Structures are given as C-alpha cells and as structure tokens.
C-alpha cells in the first residue's frame, strides 16, 4: 500500500481532517471534518482528497497506489460507526458519494445518493426500517441517479417511465405511487439501463462505489464544471475531493425531512435565520426545485426538537466561523443531522450588510469587514430599479420569490441556447424555465434575469442568480412553460419567445412588457433625490467605504468631464478629477458646429475666430468642474483625438453630394459639402490612432492649446476669486519626446502667466503629461524635466505596448483566449508583466529627475480591482476611474493594503477573462466611459472593453 494519505475519516465526534484543510479535502470535506470536531451530529464518512483526483487524471484514470485500500479501510470505520455492513444482506449500510472542490461550485459536479442498494439490500432496508415503501422509493431514486450521473443515461428516459407509471396508478405526485408501482419502476429502470448502455445495472455495492467515485472525479472535467470554472476563474489544477458518507434519510415519513438554511438572509443580509425544507424528501429535492419548499421556521411547529437543535447548531457554526453559513441538513425520524456547512454565497448588498453588522456585533474587526467584501460585488449597490411611478401603473401578471435583486427587462428566451443566440444579436433576454439546471449555465450567463416556475430561494436558479449578480424571480406558480410550443403562460397571458417581460428581483413581481429602469437607491442619494437618512442601504455602503478609506493609501479620483459627472464622482467619494477629456466638451451639440468651422478654417487667424467662441463655453465647463470638486485637484487634458472625428463621415458626405446633384440641389450647398469632403480627405489618416492626435495637435496648431489653457486659467482665477482653493493640473496627451513636452509647456506657461496677470490672481498650477507611449516611458527621465506629474494612460499604453489596436483587438483576442495565448483581456485588466513593467520603468526614470513627481493612472484599469492592487504595489499616488467605479476602487485600494500586510481578501486579485474590445466607431468612441455606468452585475464575468473614450 502506498504511504500517502488519500482518505480522511470523520465520525463519532472526531475527524482526521480539519476546517483549514480545504485545499486537500475540498470545502465540503473540510466543513464535515470541522463540524465533527465541534461535536455537531454529522453522519460518519470519509473524504478522498483532491490530490487523489489530480493523480487519477495524471495516470490516465487510474487510482493512485493505496487509494482504494484506504477507501476500503475508511468504509470499515464507517460500518463500525454505523453498526451496519456495506452490502450486508441483513443490516446494509448505504452511502452518498459527493463531489467537493476547494471553491464551491453549486450543482456543477456529480452526486449519488443511496449507494449500496441492490435487490438484496433493498429488502433488508425495508425490514430494518419497517417501511417497504420507503426502501423501494430509495431504490428507484438510486437507479435514476446512478443511471444518469454515473452511466450517462439521459434523465428523460427515466422520467418518461415515471410519468407513465404515475398515469397507470392514477396518481399525480411521486409520493403517491404505491409500493408495487415503485417496484415496477425499479424493474423498468433496470431495463432502461440495459437498453441504453447494453450493461446490466451493477448489483455489487463495491462496484457501485468505484463507479461512483470515478464519476465524481470525471465530473471535474465535465462541460458544466469547465464552463463554471472559466466564468469564475477557478483553476483546472485544483481537482475535486470525493465525500463518501453514510446515508441518513429525510424521506422516512412525516417526521423526516431535508433542508437548506442560511444563518442570515443571503439576499438582503438581514440577520434572521433563513432557509427552506421539505418534509419527507431526500437530498437534492430542495435544491432541484421540483417541489416548492416551506420556510425553515415552519419546522418549529412540525418538528420542534429538531428545530431547536438546528437553531443551536446554526448559532454555534456562525460564531465558530465568524461568517454567514450555508448549511444542509437532514432530519431522520426527528433527529437532526448536518450534512454540510460552508461560508454562504451572498449578494453584494448582503455582503456589505453582513460585514458591517458583524463588526457592530463584535464578531469581526473593521479590517476583516473590508477584506471580506469583493469590490466587484459592491457594484450591486448600483443596481437599477424600475421607475417607481411607472411600476405602480403596471399590473403584475405573476409573482414568485425575489431570489436575485435588481430590475431587469428583456425578451423571453425559453432555452439557454436561444438566450445565447439572442444575446449575440445584442438583445436583452430573460430566460424563462420551469426550473433551471446546471446544464443551463451558458444561457443564464447570457441573460439579464431568470424566471422559473418551480423552486425556492435556494434553487439552482436562485443560487446562480445571486452569484452572477443577475435578477431572478423563482418558484413563480403563475408560470407554465408550454413545452414544444415556443410559448409560456404567465398568469392570464400567453407569451411567445421574443416577447418582452420585466422582473422585479426585489419583490418577485413579473410584468408583461418592458418597464424602464432607474438608478439604485445609493445613486439616488448621491444625486440628491433621496436623503441618506431615508436609505439604510446607502448608510451601510457608506460605512464600509469609510472603513476602507481609513486603510487605503492610494487616492481615488474620477474621470469626469462635466459638472454632473463630477457631482456623482464626489458622491461616490472621488478625491479629485484625474482626467477631464476636454474633447467631450467639443462634441456637445452647441459646440460641434463651431468646432467643425474651426477645423475647416483655412488660416490660423480664421481658426482663432472660432476658438474665441469656444473659449467661454470651455471656461464655463471648467468653472462647473472646479466648483463641484471643492478644492480637490482637477486634471484637465488638452485636446487629444484626431480632428477628422469632429467632421462628418466621408461616406455620408459623398451620399449627400450625390443626392443633392440628383435632385438639383443648390449649387452653394453642393459646393460647401464638396469643400468639407476635401477637408475630410486632407485630414484622412490610414492609422489615426498613431497619427495627428494628442500633443501633436497642440504643437502643430498652438492656437488650440492657447485657447484651452486660457479657459482653464480664467476659470481657475474666477473660482479663486470666490475664495475657493484650486490648483489646476494641465495635462498634455500622447507625449513621446521630451521636446514635445518642452514645446507645449512653454506655451502653457506663457498663456497661464499672462491670464493670471490679466485676472489679477496668482495661482499655483501644475503641468504634466500622460504616459501612453513606450518611448515616453523610456525617456521619462528627460520628460520629467518639464513634467510635474505623470498620469498613465493605460488604454493607449496597452495599445502601444502590445501594438494591439484597442478598437480592433476583439477580432482575434477571442481566438487567443480560446487557445490560451491570452488569458485575460489586457484592455480591461492591466497586463502587469508587460504594460506594468513599462509603467515601472517610467516611474523609476521620472523619479531620477524629479524624486517627488506625482504619479497616477487614468486608463480604464484604474477601476479594476486587480489593477488597482498593482497600482498600489507600484507606489502610485492615485488611480482615476469612471465615477461609478470610484467605490470599487476605494475598496480595492484598501484591500491592496491588507493584502500587502499578508491578509488575503475575500476575492484575491484576479485576471478577469473576457473578449476584447467591442468595435467602436469614431462616433461611439465619443461616448465617454465616464458617462457609462458599469454594468452593475459584473461579478467575474467576461467584460467588454470600454470604448476608446
Ligand atoms: C488612455 O489612453 O488610457 C487614456 C486615458 O486616454 P484616452 O482613453 O482618452 O485615449
Ligand atoms: Mg489615451
């Protein structure tokens, strides 16, 4: 026998493993060991390690030496503990075989219950329990489960036999099938197995056990599990453990039952014992959502003694783990057995509430609270809700359980495949199913929300929704999927696939049609439409973030270029503006024609005329920003994009000209269009991203820089005269050479000083540059002679370091990801190895010349948690991100500190996976990332890269 230990026993109040061994024993195995050691009643069993699983795959599906022998020894101990024999013809021991990876992957891998039954042991079980119906019921369930999970037979094959048998016996529910019906099912199911696999159903319990273990191991690489791991960044190399545990039965009559419970509400986080159970039911019935369960508190009347033990147990477990627990239990003839405990998954909203309240209860420290909340998850605080007055006018057509918070509208998809297809067409979808199963995962991922006809708050749909941050209404009895017709009845109405519905995941209401959605409570408080006093959610959110602020070193600024954005940014706690993209001001409707005229102007003098018209408009914008920022720094970037972006599209002009000519349009109009076309052609570049943009504009057309600097300084002087503190930071884009920096700085200084003189105000201001080109990084020492700050423009820096177009990369990065050439989208997650190294070089070089040079980042990465952590480790002074990501960055920055102190956060830094940039046309590029709300529901989900700007 090999020496390595592959099997860890637990039972009779003592376990070989312990809670801290989850890497080896998986989450479930570690939890069972820990509960056993806590003297909580757990049916005895053993865990086969994840290491055994990995070795099984390494040696082409052979057990590692000693594993099987240790399994048999483990089984002997269980037999002894349970005073029963595996396969014993008089007193048989039955076991469950379940998967259990290090990270919870609900429903993704395989489970077999009642293993050990055959024609002989079933009789013994009937005698032992004095309940032949129960024994036969367990047997037919076992064949179904083993047949589908282990022998790969489609569940429908068993279901149709079951359906037919119910018809024959004239019963509706499984529980009403008489014992002879169950016996007939067993025979028929065995025939199904023989027909489908050309193999007899295995009678030998040891063969069953071996096949069960193999199936659990193999399910680690099953499609469902692989998809799940991809979505949640779980490495293939973790493997799963196998838990073999003696069976206890929740289906032994009305004093038995099974359930799932949470120590707090996983949806809202409210501190109340929460869960569901089914009487006279087994194992997966609750999670599978086949019958709608009762709330766990109803146990109090039905089985008071078990309820009392359950209440004590849940308190013990929460106190022991100092975190909300998700538990599975079975009651066999009045006696409670715990089958699982783990840290419960929760919504972002619950996560914050639990963390804050546990601090107040003295269970955890503020640092732990900050560490526990996944920064991406707090985006759920930004969940939209339905416009309340509109929702009032709508009559709900159904109501189910509010299983996943938020509001979602979309077109109905009745299959996961259809949801994926519709999503690919750019449509928002709501997946409507009788119940979801792990096989639906791809469709669930593609949908905005799910609506199910059966199942409770802990059904598959509900669990997945909360984890993915999707909206879910579960167990809606008003829903009837009209199988095979492409239709669904919801309450009084029948809908076709493609029709619109709306789900309120806070109340469980379902509406026909598309309701409009409005921002979340937190956003409403920030916008001043609600007070903090009125919103408890806001207060919890603000409390946690205030604790994060006490920990973090990095400052968090926002990318904002309009006063309303600046106001939102401040509301989210931004400590300044790190990037104001001034071109957005020129795209505004009232300014675009002046800008166009300015670009069309043939001489600098003519250009000046239009610039003079733009000046007061820019000045007003800056005044608005400064006022909103109340003394916090404001970095204003000079004009960046190529000028042709401000002119009409070439193709459109050609169409217009042709149309005018065909319809005898006015000669002057034709002439004008032709002139514009000529100018568009003049400005046309083969590669505008690398062309006349950034500081190259201000250098070749210095009058633009002059006007902008004047506006920046006049605004600053005016605000200073109001008695407010203001230090403008003027930022030059796309500098690649020290000479460019010098040339632009000279103009800036001259205009700034002249303006201050004119206004009679003396102000401090800074002049700095973006670092967006590798050459700028390499020559940062020289550039820093003039630059007083560097702000890393990592959108362009990623583009130029990789030589990968930020607008076109999506065309092949999907292929790269599939073929493991890229394992994350570098436009969403900072490439620490490449782009990060370029940043480090620039910092080091810049500091040689200017040791205290101010350093920040303003590319999209500034709001992505793992990138924020990297910026902290580099020693930047601030990150700047879109206003809606400011809170995420604040939390991530605090976690970066805790991480560096050696305390791992709830979600460790990760490289997000995802497709690369969506195609962004010049027009689309004008849509500022700062005005775009991040999709609130972004947990570990492949992300689209933001538009260029
Ligand atoms: C950048 O390149 O990272 C940046 C912030 O500038 P823009 O996205 O406007 O090019
Ligand atoms: Mg840029």
Image: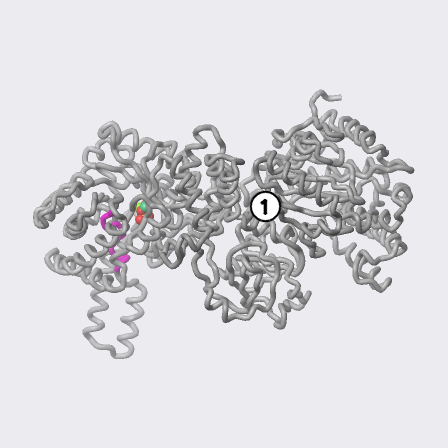
> Residue 895 location in percent, x, y?
44, 36
Name the spot of residue 521 as percent of width and height, x first: 44, 55
Q: Is residue 138 magenta?
A: no
The residue positioned 22% from the left and 46% from the top of the image is 695
Q: Nearer the viewer, residue 460 or 71?
A: 460
Q: Quadrant of residue 584?
A: bottom left
In the picture, measured across the screen, residue 846 lies left or right of residue 70, that is left
Judged left or right of residue 60, residue 390 is left
Quick one: label 1, few (<14), some, or many (20+) residues within 10 Å?
Answer: many
Relative depth, front residue between 12 and 139: 12
| Residue drawn where x is 81% and y is 58% of the image | 161
Q: Image quarter for residue 851?
A: top left
Kindly state the secondary structure of the residue where label 1 is placed. loop
Position of residue 365 measured from the top left corner of the image (x, y, whole percent):
48, 34
Colour scheme in the image?
one colour
Q: Which residues are magenta?
A: 635-646
- Where residue 708 appears, as percent x and y from the top left, is 18, 51
């Amino acid at each position: 026998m090999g020496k390595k230990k592959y099997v860890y026993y637990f039972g009779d109040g003592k376990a070989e493993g312990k809670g801290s061994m989850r890497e080896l024993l998986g989450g479930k195995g570690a939890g069972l060991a820990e509960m056993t050691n806590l003297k909580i009643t757990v049916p005895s069993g053993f865990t086969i390690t994840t290491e055994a699983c990995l070795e099984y795959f390494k040696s082409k599906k052979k057990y590692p030496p000693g594993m099987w022998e240790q399994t048999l020894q483990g089984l002997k101990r269980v037999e002894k503990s349970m005073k029963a024999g595996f396969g014993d013809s008089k007193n048989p021991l039955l076991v469950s075989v379940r998967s259990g990876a290090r990270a919870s992957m609900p429903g993704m891998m395989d489970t077999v219950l009642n293993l050990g039954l055959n024609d002989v042991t079933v009789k013994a079980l009937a005698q032992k329990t004095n309940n032949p119906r129960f024994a036969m019921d367990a047997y037919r369930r076992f064949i179904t489960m083993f047949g589908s999970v282990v022998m790969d037979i489609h569940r429908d094959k068993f279901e149709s036999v079951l359906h037919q048998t119910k018809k024959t016996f004239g019963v509706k529910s499984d529980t009403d099938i008489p014992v002879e019906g169950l016996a007939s099912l067993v025979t028929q199911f065995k025939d199904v197995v023989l027909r489908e696999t050309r193999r007899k159903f295995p009678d030998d319990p040891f063969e069953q056990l071996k096949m069960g273990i193999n199936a659990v191991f193999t399910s680690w690489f099953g499609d469902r599990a692989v998809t799940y791991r991809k979505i949640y960044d779980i490495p293939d190399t973790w493997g799963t453990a196998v838990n073999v545990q003696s069976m206890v039965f929740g289906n032994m009559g009305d004093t038995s039952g099974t359930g799932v419970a949470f120590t707090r509400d996983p949806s809202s986080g409210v501190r109340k014992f929460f869960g569901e159970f089914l009487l006279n039911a087994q194992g997966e019935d609750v999670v599978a959502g086949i019958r709608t369960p009762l709330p766990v508190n109803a146990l109090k009347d039905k089985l008071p003694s078990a309820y009392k033990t359950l209440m004590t147990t849940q308190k013990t477990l929460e106190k022991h783990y100092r975190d909300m627990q998700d538990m599975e239990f079975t009651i066999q003839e009045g006696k409670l057995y715990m089958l699982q405990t783990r840290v419960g998954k929760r919504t972002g909203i619950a996560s914050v509430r639990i963390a804050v309240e546990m601090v107040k209860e003295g269970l955890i420290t503020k640092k732990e609270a900050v560490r526990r909340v996944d920064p991406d998850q707090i985006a759920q605080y930004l969940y939209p809700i339905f416009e309340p007055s509109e929702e009032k006018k709508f009559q709900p057509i159904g109501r189910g359980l509010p299983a996943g918070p938020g509001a979602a509208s979309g077109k109905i998809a009745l299959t996961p495949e259809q949801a994926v297809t519709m999503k690919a067409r750019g449509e928002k979808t709501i997946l409507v199913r009788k119940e979801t199963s792990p096989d639906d995962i791809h469709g669930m991922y593609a949908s905005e929300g799910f609506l199910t006809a059966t199942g409770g708050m802990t059904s598959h749909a509900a669990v997945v929704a909360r984890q993915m941050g999707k909206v879910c209404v579960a167990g809606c009895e008003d829903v009837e999927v009209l199988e095979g017709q492409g239709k669904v009845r919801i309450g009084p109405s029948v809908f076709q696939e493609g029709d619109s519905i709306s789900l309120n995941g806070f109340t469980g209401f379902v509406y026909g049609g598309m309701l409009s959605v409005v921002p979340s409570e937190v956003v409403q408080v920030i916008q001043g439409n609600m007070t903090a006093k009125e919103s408890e959610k806001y207060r919890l959110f603000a409390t946690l973030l205030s604790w994060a602020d006490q920990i973090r070193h990095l400052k968090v600024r926002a990318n904002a270029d309009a006063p309303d954005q600046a106001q939102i940014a401040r509301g989210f706690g931004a400590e300044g503006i790190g990037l104001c993209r001034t071109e957005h001001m020129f795209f505004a409707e009232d300014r675009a024609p002046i800008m166009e005229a300015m670009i069309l102007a043939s001489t600098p003098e003519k250009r000046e005329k239009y610039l003079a018209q733009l000046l007061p408009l820019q000045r007003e914008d800056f005044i608005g920003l400064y006022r909103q920022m109340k003394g916090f720094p404001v970095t204003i970037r000079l004009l960046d994009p190529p000028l042709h972006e401000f002119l009409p599209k070439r193709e459109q002009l050609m169409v217009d000209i042709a149309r005018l000519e065909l319809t005898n349009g006015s000669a002057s109009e034709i002439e004008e269009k032709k002139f514009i076309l000529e100018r568009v052609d003049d400005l046309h570049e083969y590669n505008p991203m690398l062309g006349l943009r950034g500081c190259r504009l201000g250098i070749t057309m210095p009058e633009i820089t002059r006007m902008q600097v004047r506006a920046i300084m006049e605004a600053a002087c005016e605000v200073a005269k109001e008695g407010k503190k203001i230090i403008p930071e003027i930022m030059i884009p796309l500098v690649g050479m020290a000479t460019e920096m010098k040339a632009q700085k000279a103009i800036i200084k001259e205009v700034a000083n002249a303006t201050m003189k004119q206004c009679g105000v003396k102000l401090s201001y800074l002049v700095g540059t973006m670092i967006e080109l590798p050459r700028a990084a390499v020559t940062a020492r020289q550039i820093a002679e003039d630059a007083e700050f560097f702000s890393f423009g990592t959108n362009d820096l990623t583009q130029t370091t990789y030589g990968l177009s930020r607008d076109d990369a999506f065309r092949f990065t999907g292929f790269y990801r599939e073929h493991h050439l890229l394992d994350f989208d570098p436009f969403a997650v900072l490439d620490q190895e490449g782009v990060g190294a370029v940043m480090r070089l620039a910092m080091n070089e810049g500091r040689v010349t200017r040791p205290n040079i101010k350093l920040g980042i303003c590319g999209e990465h500034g709001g992505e948690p793992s990138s924020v952590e990297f910026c902290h480790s580099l020693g930047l002074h601030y990150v700047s991100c879109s206003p809606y990501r400011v809170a995420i960055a604040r939390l991530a920055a605090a976690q970066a500190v805790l991480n560096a102190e050696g305390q791992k956060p709830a979600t460790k830094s990760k490289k997000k996976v995802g497709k690369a940039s969506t195609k962004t046309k010049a027009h689309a590029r004008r849509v500022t990332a700062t005005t775009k709300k991040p999709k609130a529901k972004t947990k570990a989900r492949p992300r689209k890269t933001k538009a260029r700007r």
